[in-house]
Image (spheres, rainbow, N blue to C red):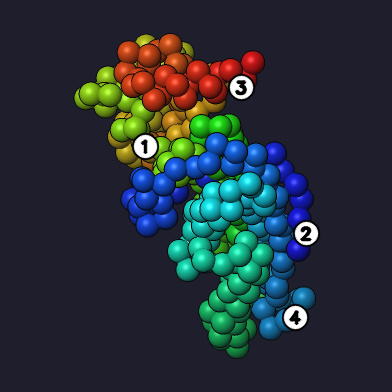
Amino acid sequence: MKKQTVSLLVLLLAASGFFFSCGNTVNKNAYALEFDSIQVNETVHLFGDTAKPACNLILNFAYASQSSDVRLKDSLNTFFLSACFGDKYMAMTPEEAVKKYTEKYVGDYRNDLEPMYKKDEEDKQDEQSIGAWYSYYKGIESHVQLCNTLMLTYRIDYNEYTGAHGIYMSTFLNLDLKTLSPIRLDDLFEGDYKEALTDLLWKQLMADNNVSTRQELEDMGYATTGDLEPIENFYLDPTGITFYYNVYEIAPYVMGATKITLSYEDIAHLMNGEFITLSSAIKADGE
C-alpha cells in the first residue's frame, strides 16, 4: 500500500442519523482540511498458482488526514469508510479498514471459488473456458470532488466483474459541514418541488439529445428501465446541480450512465435560502 496526497451511495443516506446528529456544529477553524488516499492493487490466484485464474482488487480510498477539529476529521472518515466498505469498517482507522477489506475480499474469493474450480477441473472441462468464469475484478475509487467552508462532496466510483457480467456505478455524498449531516434534496428545494423539477429534467434531457418530445427520448431508450425523476445521487458545481443516473436506473446498460445538469438560473424559483447561499459560494469558488 502507498499513500498519495489528493486536494461520495444513496443507501447510506437513510442511515445517516447514525453518524451525525443535527445538533452538532463545526468549529469555524476546522475547515482547513487535508486529504490523503490509500491505494491498493492486489492480485491473488486460486490455490496460489499463477497458472490459475485470479482476482484483482484495486482501491483508492480518500480520507481526511488533517483538521484542526479532530471531531470533524473522525466524523468524515466514519462516513467515508461506511460508504466505501460497509458499516462493519466505520469504527476502524482508514489504514486498518483498507487492510481488513482487502484481506476479506481475496479470502472470500479463494474460499468460495476454489472448491468449484477444483470440481470443474476434475470434470475435465476446457481449462481456458473455465478460467474466464473464475477471473474476478473489483475497483473502488473515491475522491473529494468539492470542499469549501459550507459543504463537501465525496465521489465513489465502483466497478466489479464476477466472471459473467460487469457492473459499474458512481455515487455522490454531499455533506453540510456546519451540521455534519448529509444534504438531501428536501434541504435544497422548497414547497412541492418534485413535479416541477421532473419537468425540468425532461426538458434538459431533450435539449441534451436534440429532440423535442418525451416520446423521442423513450424511443432512444430513456425511461424504459425506470422513471426519470429527481434522485438523491447528485452533486453541485459552479454550473448547477447534476443528477447522476447509473446504468439501468433510467436506461439500458448499453446506454451507460446518464448525467443531467440543471443550471442555477433554471432552478432558481425552486431553491430555498440555504441552496441560494450554497450556490453562491460554489460559483464564487469556481471563478
| Alpha-carbon span between mark 3 and mark 4 | 52 Å
Q: Quadrant of residue 49?
A: bottom right
Are there few (<14), some (14-19), or many (20+) residues within 10 Å of tag 2? few
Of marks 3 and 4, the one in the foreground: 3
Amino acid on which the number 2 mark rests in the picture: Lys
Placement of the N terminus among the 4 image quadrants: bottom right
Mark closest to the chain's N terminus, 1 or 3: 1
Mark 3 element type: helix
> Pointer 2: what residue?
2
Of marks 3 and 2, the one in the foreground: 3
Mark closest to the chain's N terminus, 4 or 1: 4
> Pointer 3: what residue?
285
> Pointer 4: what residue?
49
Mark 1 element type: loop
User: Do the residues under discs 1 and 3 have CB atoms within 8 angstroms?
Assistant: no
Amino acid on which the number 4 mark rests in the picture: Asp
Left or right of 195, for residue 74: right
